[in-house]
Amino acid sequence: MPASWSRGGRPLLLLAFCALGGLAPCLAQQPGLEPLVKLHKTLLLVAGPSPPIRSTDDDILITVGGELFSTAVTRELVPGAHFETTIAQGTSSPAALAALNRALAAGHPARLSGVCGANLVPLGSTFRYQITWFGGHGRTSTFTLTNTGDVPGPPCTQSQIAIAVAILSLEDEVLADPATHFTRSSCASDADCVGGELCCYPCGIPGCSNVCTPVSGSGGRCPALP
């Protein structure tokens, strides 16, 4: 069992079961987990004129009380790099939650729908942010911001952009908080791995993250780099 589950990370296990059985019914049974917004983020990051350097597929849930649950799958776009999973659960500051609520109040999300265009990432990068808002009395709405070339809708409004920025800012704050609980597929040391595995560097160039690797066929050492 990952260490983070034994150190207050039980909501992560709960979230995994919810994902298997449907999130909404599970949340309805858990006091304090009333949903406020969800964001599904896909991002292909480019730095300058170089080829893409990282892909991200991230699902973010923020509750009305400021709890954040994030499940991200990332990959450094270098030879030999693997997909990595990072699951995070933490609580936002009152200021970050208040900023999100202000953006929602000003943006009237119940009236928002469809797909709009915006430039919110470095030049050459592509993104798609699908935002779902959960209101009272069963109200909900979904809208999408993107910069892909086939955007069928109009430019995004400042209100739509402000909501997206507030969600992402809250996520950044929680991910940087030392109190946030993480479960990762990558490793920092051999202690993070199970028996028969070592924490090894998986590719032959800088930029990859260490991963737990079986070593039974390599003499008890990390395999030779590809």
Image (cartoon, grey):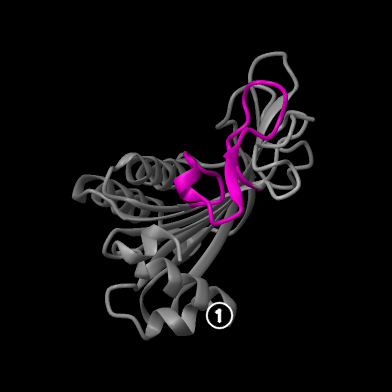
Q: Amino acid at mark 1?
A: Gly
Q: Residues within 10 Å of mark 1 (few under 14, many from 20)?
A: few
Q: Which residue is mark 1?
A: 22
Magenta residues, start to end: 184-213
Residue 189 included in the magenta stretch of the image: yes
Name the residue nearer the viewer: 153 or 187.
187
Height in image: 192 above or below 78? below
Using residue 175 as the reference point, say whether residue 194 is left or right of it.
Answer: right
Q: Report x, y in % for residue 200.
A: 61, 37
In the rendered image, the residue lying farthest to the front is 219
On the question of residue 43 being in view, the answer is no
Instruction: Determine the secondary structure under disc 1.
Output: loop
| In the image, farthest residue toward the top | 49
Query: Residue 156: in sight, yes or no?
Result: yes
Query: In this image, 94 relative to 19: left or right?
Result: left
Q: Quick one: 170 or 50, which is closer to the camera?
A: 50
Above or below for 89 versus 136: above
Predominant secondary structure in magenta?
Answer: loop
Would residue 53 be found to the left or right of residue 66 on screen? Answer: right
Q: Please name the residue shown 39% across and 59% down the image.
A: 3
Q: Which residue: 59% across, 24% down? A: 122
Q: Is residue 143 above or below residue 45?
A: below
